[in-house]
Amino acid sequence: MEQPAVLVIGAGISGIQASFDLASRGIKVYLVEKSPSIGGRMAQLDKTFPTMDCSMCILAPKMIDCSHHPNVELLTYSEVKEVKGSPGNFTVKVVKKPRYVDISKCTGCGICVDNCPVEVTNEFDEGLGMRKAIYMPFPQAVPRAMTIDKENCIECGLCEKMCEAGAVDLEQKQEEIELKVGAIIVATGFDIFDPSQIPPYGYGRHKDVITALELERLLCASGPTGGHLVRPSDGKVPKTIAFIQCVGSRDRRHGNPYCSSICCKYAVKDAVLIKEHDPSARVCIFYIDLRAFGRGFQEFVNRAKTEYGIRFIRSNPGEITYDPETNGLSIWYEDTVTKKIENLKFDLVVLSAALIPRKDVGDLVKVLGIEVDPYGFLKSSSSISDPVDTTVPGIFACGYCLGPKTGDIPDSVSQGSAAASRAAEVIVGGK
Amino acid sequence: MTKLSELEPKFMHEVANTPRGKGILACIQCGRCSSSCPIARLVDEHNPRQLMEMIILGSRDEVLHTKLPWYCLSCFTCLDRCPQGGDVAEVMFAIRNLAVREGNVPDGFAAQAGNLIKTGRVVTPAMMMINKREKLGLSKTPSTAIEEVQKILKKTTLDKMMASRRTVKE
Amino acid sequence: MKYAMFWGCLIPAREPNYEVSVRKIMPAFGVKLVEMEGTNCCAPFGIQSLDYMSWLALAARNLCIGEEMGLDIVTLCNDCYESLLMVNTMLKTDHELKNQVNEILAEVGKEYKGKIDVKNMIDVLYDDVGVKKVKDAVKKPFTGLKVATQPGCHLTKPKRIHFGERKFDAFDELVRATGAETIDYDRRQSCCGGPLRGINDELARDVARMKLISIKNAGAECIVTVCPFCFLELDMSQLEIKRHFKEEYNLPVLHFAELLRMAMGMKLDDWETKSHRVPLNPLLKDRLQEG
């Protein structure tokens, strides 16, 4: 009998690692991804801590290796709609949404994008920039092809006319594909907490109060400002920047009580990045506890203090208000170390928002029949001895969909490999 | 500041077991309350985070015998924002209740209590107002039940607490 | 719609104009306010600071009167509202506490049973009457008037009791129903400083000042309040601030009932206009009675 394949749902770094590991040992993988390109959150980041490597430079080779592997079949812009069966023998229905572009013909040249008359907010840039109705989410997208967002497309047909490869197919239909797989791996990742749930922080009312993920897009060369850190309100370069930690994390009232585990790390990383962009910028990080565990991280924090002059203030500010005098933002806080109540003005405030389960994971969880914890993260069948097994045999999980991790990217990669190994046991069988 | 030898480590639990005082157990000293408090911005003496700290450390004497907990507006801003459910504003009430039992009541509050015990109300209309209300066709003054109020306050011993009060130290 | 009307202490003692306005607008919405006989102080913040059981018993005694009348209680004052609502909620859910309170109430022949609800005038207008009916009753809308709303802390917080931002939004909607424009300002959810009156007048004034600065910066022309304490504080303190800081804000303060009354086409009498320390002229001059 032919060796069954594995279905991997979610093509972020964790899902990509799992897919590649399985493919490398001769197992066929269907890699399903909801968005038009694989890559996930790592594609949105500028640099990764603590080595400050360019995120895309690490991710892109993995994306290529994985997608080009003969054992990996990419099903992008697709969703899993139905799952039946048992380990070794699952039947899965996948719906492939029409992108109205033939990816075998599209060269990614971009003429269509230049001529498209419709502009909408760009979700890849967290709403900070614009994209056209026909678009590629980011330059290194895999598959390297355009997608038409039919909801906003006005069907003017210009793209079809301009395309020299004849790749635009406005008649393309949704496809339903049935797959037979032996094991399933869920790697759907996370969403960011919406800080407008904490009204005193002014997110949504003041344009210069942004989340850390939005900051990453502003710092990233492929982002809406070409990597120049400017204020969303007036395009000026911010000279004073504040980070506020634990926004929606460790918060029984507005968010979730857990610690998202990576915000202290990414905030210090982003603070250092800002200082590298502009050494004259003054950066303050408002924290409750500075959680800097793991290899290299406490040293990184120490460097941030001594070499980069980043100011760490132990305080959880109550509100962020607009300051008309400086056209900036005012933060009142009590420095709990000096016990003094003070006020500082900032040009830009970055909220280190919590990482939460994806909003759409609820539907997938129902389809798969797996359990989630009270926060919406996938439950392991035993969080100590079987961390990558879900509550349904034959279905495994990896990455942040399992909940807060300790090391972020390296942990997600390790878990990808772990899930691959577990899935392989089902496929290859044996004792 | 209280001397180390005068700290009472059990104070935190005494407060936690007083009505409205349970929130003290949740405090992680993050400073959200003090960063939000309008009074803390105006005067040094009042600082909700610091009050919680003093309770946790056990500065019982200072907390219960000085003006410290009496500046609170009970605006509930701190309570709404505390990420741990520390209910700071409620702990303020618990502390005040404890302070009153030890005979410490600031003048303004004692005056209100005095009115309450005498008239059944905290504020009563002056003669001029009573006449004005009559002219406007409103009831002269809302009817009240002084005797019943006094009976209640006798049973809860509030009248005794007020009788044995001392002025609060600055 | 019938309710037991709990006037509290402050309105009868200091603000008869608030009472008059409320009595004038409620009949238009079919709301009948029945007088409560023999009420006592609700036990606001100052009394709560002294003793827990005294607070519960005093508030519960008023609740008993409402229960005996078989009507929900409506208050105007935020302090009364907070006190009665919180005690009502606690005694409805904590039976042991209820028994302790009833032991005290037995001294005066009363028993709390937990049969009624406590509402504020804003709850009545928003939930029971409805914004649409309020809008329909408006004959002379306040078009173009920039209002800073002050619903007050004890109407709206703790947020877990008052469903988050709901009360803030509800009050703003009611003010907008009169045709006015509600201005958002940074310290909209902040305290007026009122609770410290009589205890530390300077602090009360300084807290009010923080609020007034924020309102002025946002471009509002006047302030509309629900609570009589907020009214007194924001109105009175402007004169104190003028004396002490030499700053003038010129922000007339109105009770919401007065705003609605004028929007319904009635004019304020001279004595009512005079009870506002910050002059209502010239902002509202065509809504005020001559001399």
Image (spheres, coloured by chain):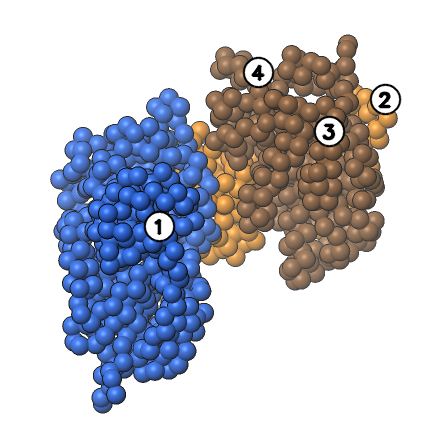
Chain colours: A blue, B orange, C brown
Q: Which of labels 1 and 3 is toward the front?
A: 1
- Locate residue A9: give its quadrant: bottom left
Q: Which x, y percent locates residue A288?
A: 33, 47
- Locate residue B162: give its quadrant: top right
Q: Secondary structure at mark 4?
A: loop
| Chain letter for mark 4 | C
| Chain letter for mark 1 | A
Residue located beneath label 2 in the image: B135
Precedes in sequence: disc 3 or disc 4: 3
| Chain letter for mark 2 | B
Q: Is residue B8 left or right of residue A67?
A: right
> Label 1 to label 3, Cα distance in Å?
50 Å
Q: Say if mark 1 contacts mark 2, CB within 8 Å.
A: no
> Label 1 to label 2, Cα distance in Å?
76 Å
Residue located beneath label 4 in the image: C250
Q: Which amino acid does the dot numbered 3 rest on?
A: Val
> Label 4 to label 1, Cα distance in Å?
57 Å
Residue located beneath label 1 in the image: A148
Q: Residues within 10 Å of mark 3 (few under 14, many from 20)?
A: some
Q: Residue at x 52, y 52 (%)?
A: B21
Q: Which x, y percent locates residue A257?
A: 41, 57
Question: Please, is residue B74 above or below residue C291 in the view?
Answer: below
Q: Say if mark 1 contacts mark 3, CB within 8 Å.
A: no
Residue located beneath label 3 in the image: C138
> Label 4 to label 2, Cα distance in Å?
31 Å
**Along the line of sight, the residue nearer the viewer: C137 or A143:** A143
Q: Which amino acid does the dot numbered 1 rest on?
A: Ile
Q: Say if mark 2 contacts mark 3, CB within 8 Å.
A: no
Q: Say if mark 3 contacts mark 4, CB within 8 Å.
A: no
Q: Residue at x 52, y 57 (%)?
A: B17
